[in-house]
Structure formats: C-alpha cells, structure tokens
Amino acid sequence: MMRYKINLLFVPLLALMLTGCDKPAATSALVLEGKTMGTVWRVSLAGVDSERKAELQQRIQQRLDADDAELSTWKPDSVLSRFNQSRDLSPQPVSENMADIVTTSLRIGRKTGGAMDITVGPLVNLWGFGPTKQPLHTPDAAQIAAARAETGLQHLRVLQGANGQWLQKDLPGLYVDLSTVGEGFATDHLARLMEQLGINNYLVSVGGAVLSRGLNAQQQPWRVAIQKPTDQENAVQARVDLQGHGISTSGSYRNYYELDGHRISHVIDPVTGRPIEHKLVSATVIATTALEADGWDTGLMVLGTEKAKALATQQHLAVYLISKQGDKFVSWMSPQFAAFLIPAESGEN
C-alpha cells in the first residue's frame, strides 16, 4: 500500500495541516512521527507521559507495517498483490480488515456511479502512477480501451460467512488498487490502536487523512487547516473543528507530470480511462471515519465541480470544494461541512 498520496498516486496531497500542537512545551501534546506506505504518519497525544514515547512509536509502526504488508500494490508479496497476480476466479480468503475496506470502497464506488473505482489499477499503471514506470508517450485509444476492459466494480465482490471472509473476481486480469482509501483505513486503524492503549485524546494522521478524538493538550478541540491549492506550504484556505470525525482531501494541483506537452494528473477517470481535465482542484470530505472520507473525496474529485456538488447534496455529505475559475480559486461547501467550519476571526487554538 505504499505511495498512496505522495508519489503521484490517487490520494490527498497532504493538504491538511494539523494545528494546535505547537504551544509551549508545558502544555504541548506528545508528538510521534514516522514513515509508512510511501508517506508519513503523525500522532499527537494529549495527557500521555513522554516516557511512553518509545513504546508507542514501536506499536504504531508495527501496526502500520502490518497494514502495508497486507494492502500494498508496491510489495509483490502483499496479500493484495498476490490476489492481483492470481488468475484464479475462486474466492480467496482475506482478513476482516481487507473485507471491510473493499466493502466500503464498493459501496462508495456504486454511489459515485463508478467514479471511485478500486479496480482502476490497470489504468493507474498505464498512466504511470502505479508500481510500473511512467510511459514514454501518451497512451493511445487502443491501450486505454484494453486497460478499461480489465476494470469494473461489478467484477469484484466480498463474501462473508461464519467462518471468515473472501474476495472474488470474475476477470483473471482484475487488479485491485486500494491507494484511494489506504491512508484513511490506516488512520482509522491508528485510532483503534489508541483506544486499545487507553488513550482517549489524540489526533492521528497518515498522509492526508486525519481523525481526532477528545481534546488537545490545552483542553481545546483538535483543529485542522485545509491548505490553499498553491505551492505555498502554509497557505490556509479554511479551518475546521473535527468534533471527533475523520477528514481527507483529494486534489490535482500538485501530483502530476508532463508528457508530450500536456500536464498529466494523477486522478484518473475510470469512465474515460484518462486523467481528469476539469476545473475542480481539491475536494475535502469530513465523515465519521477517515476511511469513509478518503473514499468519498476521490470520487468527488473525479466527478468535477457540478456533479460533486449534486452528489454531496444528495448524499448529505460534509464537503468542501475548491475550483479554479480563470486566475482565481472559488470555494463551495455543503451545509453539513459548514457545521465544522471555524470562523476566520476566531483564529487558531
């Protein structure tokens, strides 16, 4: 599951900036950081003794390494890679974690009309955003059609039973890519680990997916800043109080490469088989879990501004969109998102 949102893969562009963790040492959170899945993880803990730092660092890294070994498409021996490499059409046993992430992805995929499609791997690889190398020339219509023929949510299903769960495909070449939801899943997994360790006040993130519980070291709600779609690292577009929810951002303004004189976005439209070219540059979603937010932000990003607005309204989602109009950026938020927004004049905590 490496390189989810950093190395030009589907997921957020690290557009969420954590706030509220830079107070004087006496009232600061215990902050732990590391690397996983080709990106970085960060855990901020309030009311936790610093003597536990080494133990917690190890437990967190072990948990994330286990997730990566299961869900990575970059590791040929991962559970997911073995499923993708197999031509066997019979049900393959998988963990409860794998079953849950695929089930959630299929549900969101159907609700987005296939815009969020975890079987889009052949197209991701064709355009050079997977484990394969960047193409020397723009893929032609025949190559795109061939890759699209190996995709489709209808070709994948999860089977649940009293004795376990299984993943099954009906196309031998079906290639499942969980890059679109990996960071959200891992973030939720970190939150569960914190609860298991008896920690109730935390802000956890993997890449651009974030989730919080409780209060920060100043006994205030954890707050997150959404970055403006510019090259300025600390330019803030908006701030939100997560209120115990997860948040994730997908965008197109940083993760791209140039090919044959064209900018190639890492966000691939499964319907056309091509990188998106519309004006929506960022989609942020707040949901009860980081996995849910991570799945929806990708689908909305693929759909473009107007379709994303319509779907967010229909599904009552907490969504914040940024679109480019000429030389300006224009934002839109759903009523559900407005409930999390911190007024600009209130400042940071």
Image: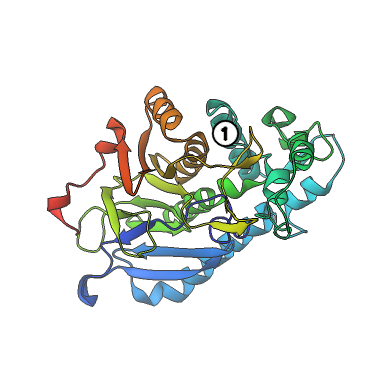
Type of amino acid under label 1: Ala
- Whether 85 is drawn above or below 52: the answer is above
Answer yes or no: is residue 214 visible: yes
Which residue is most to the top? 314
* Front residue of this view, candidates 339 and 191: 339
Residue drawn at (37%, 58%), measured in percent from left and top? Answer: 230
* Image quadrant in which the N terminus is located: bottom right
* Residue 177: x %, y % from top left: 67, 46
* Residue 124: x %, y % from top left: 67, 48
Q: Quadrant of residue 36?
A: bottom right
* Residue 277: x %, y % from top left: 53, 42
Residue drawn at (73%, 44%), measured in percent from left and top? Answer: 122
* Image quadrant in which the C terminus is located: bottom left
Q: Does residue 145 appear left or right of residue 237 in this picture?
A: right
Counting other residues with Cα less than 10 Å from the Cα at mark 1, is it few (<14), some (14-19), or many (20 or more)? many
Answer yes or no: is residue 176 visible: no
- Whether 163 is drawn above or below 242: the answer is above
* Front residue of this view, candidates 116 and 99: 116
Which residue is most to the right? 88
Quickly name the residue at label 1.
115
* Residue 237: x %, y % from top left: 29, 52
- Whether 122 is drawn above or below 37: the answer is above
Residue drawn at (46%, 76%), measured in percent from left and top? Answer: 54
Q: Quadrant of residue 168?
A: top right
Q: Quadrant of residue 30?
A: bottom left
